[in-house]
Image: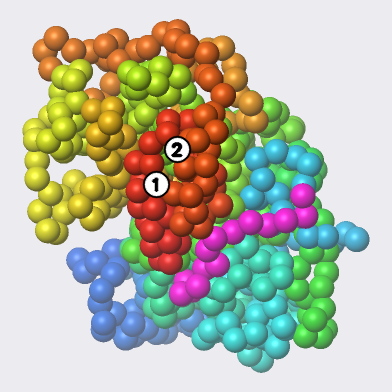
Amino acid sequence: MDKERTMRLHITPLAVAVGASLICAALPAFAGEFRTTDNPIRGQYIVVLKPQAASLAGESNRAEPVAVAAKAIASQHRASLVRSYDRVLRGFVVKANDNALAALLADPRVAYVEEDGIATLDTIQTGATWGIDRIDRRLLPLDTLYTYDTTGAGVHAYVIDSGLNVSHTEFTGRVGLGADFIGGGVNDCNGHGTHVAGTLGGTTYGVAKQVTLHPVRVFPCSGGSPWSTIIAGVNWVAANHISPAVVNMSLGGGGNSSVDAAVANLHNINGITVVVAAGNSNANACGFSPAREPVAITVGSVDNTDTRSWFSNYGSCLDLFAPGSAITSAWIGSNTATNTINGTSMAAPHVAGAAARYLQTYPAASPTAVWNAVYYAANIFGVTPSWPGVGNLGAGSPNVMLHYGSLNDGYNDGDPHIRTVNGLYYDFQTGGEFVALRGQGMEIQTRQRPVDSLPWVSVNTAVATRVGNHRVTWQPGTGVVPDPAGLQLRVDGVVTTIPAGGIDLGPGAKVTALGGNGISIHFPDGTRMTATANWWGNQNQWYMNVRAYDTMATDGIMGVLEQGEWLEPDFSDKWRVDRKTSLFDYAQDVDPGKFVSEPFPREKIPPMNPGNVELAKQVCARIKDEKLHKDCLFDVGTTGDPVFVEGAANEAALKQEIDAR
């Protein structure tokens, strides 16, 4: 995340006048750095030690040295040790008078001393749930449905909050090991942590309905807690988490560099995605911790009209918005209790749940990869012409709102029948080379050729792709006349044979053979493409079926379209490639213009021959998939050639294999 962070230290006028005079009178000239915070706890400080030669990560014996050093330094300077940290910070918490504080600041082992302060839970009480309904839809109105194809199963979500109503039916069988830094166990007596966990992973109200939830209790019943206690919770997660993991921190307060550093180290050193609330002050989030921390995913709140909630913080430190007004979720008091409340606290777990769902599919994904997946899925709104954007989003805020329904599938079959990634069906009859699907680090292009004896029909004959930094094509030679001997696979222009283990093209990118008549390509963004081909002997032509699975790409003739958009006069030209943008390989005298067929069709489409219709009914009967059966009836009925049955059968088998993953 590329955020502009403004480091602000907030103190009340009283704290400035009294604190400064006391400290300045006591400190020697070579005193270390002293940092202030909002809502300070008088006489309690976070002491951060200077870095040592060893890394923060991977030290099995690091806890004892930090604890020993903390005890020795505190004792030496007559301060009372509260706790020490060994993972996300090398430091400790003390209670100290002014003389002890001065001595700590003068100690050469100390990097800085920061006032401990009070953090709060970012909630506003009001008086169903629409949040998960919104995140799987591109446009309003809502449809009371939540469509998802992953559940977060196998992923561990750590909710650093007020605990959890562990007996609630929303969480049955999915509460993992937690930690209590308040006293009395992890059970929630506030309600906030239970509500947040319910939105993240509740059976009814949750985004990720099978994630394992780990309560990390750092807030008491009253709802306010020292930063030092919250850092202890973060430190525990660093030491005890099970991967793949995501952390939700629906909490905040004035700027505190120690908690910011703890969050940064949890992300950078431990490789854990951290989602935080932007805050409820209707102010610039860059003035609040941990919202201002660049590596955290900072979430603002919108209401059910896609307008920024009146309370939500805003600005360049936000990464995206998510539903946070009038969110219903689990509560305390009984094992079925619910409550409807507002806050950026309610927005953040929507995003954490989406991250958990992504980690189910890609458990080894880095926090950067998780953020990219969430961001590019959310950014689908940016390519939705009818979406007006986040209303009243606030100065500097990104016009990005969480969208995470199902990872999308699309296909471009035969002559060609297209299913877009947002579930629309149409037939695309023309001639030329087109962008089929384009996204982050990937692109698929298809070539369509008219059939000489059936001038109202065109078929896919070749496919070309951009796979990260590589170009992969599967086409019948580089000329205009197709080679019946077979299709050629080229990687960066070089004819290549796929070995048994496939062709690795970098992280997440691979080309493998698919049976005897197909290829499969995995793209770095998680998209998988399959292409299968058959020789149409009667027409001396190849025809090809191209499918994309689990994609977040939105551009192209298979991309995110509006109903009837393909009927617009310039639709095909919008996605047509030229010599500069084409990914195909060509002979010296060939270019994309050789494959353009305008106007198309050259003849009016005749009615289907009754004999062809009867033939289609007979030969297509074995195709049980409803959509493939319908396409088979059309293809055979139009052409009178049963060759399309084999293509449909191959696709049905492939679809069954993919669905069984």
Does the CB distance between marks 2 and 1 fall below 8 Å?
A: yes
Image position of 118 with respect to 130: above or below: below
Q: Residue at x 66, y 91 (%)?
A: 184
The reply, left or right, for residue 378 in relation to residue 509 is right
Is 154 inside the magenta-drawn segment? yes
Instruction: Residue 241: tell me if it is visible.
Output: yes
> Mark 2 and mark 1: span between their CA atoms?
8 Å
Q: Which residue is mark 1?
A: 645
Q: Which residue is mark 2?
A: 636
The reply, left or right, for residue 440 in relation to residue 624 is left
The reply, left or right, for residue 129 in relation to residue 570 is right
Q: Quadrant of the C terminus?
A: bottom left
- Return the x and y of residue 650 as percentages of the image width and height: 35, 52
- Return the x and y of residue 635 as percentages of the image width and height: 46, 36
Q: Which picture quadrant has residue 32?
A: bottom left
Using the image as rendered, state which of residue 420 and residue 369 is in the foreground.
420
Q: Residue at x 70, y 78 (%)?
A: 170
Where are the magenta residues, as a range? 143-157
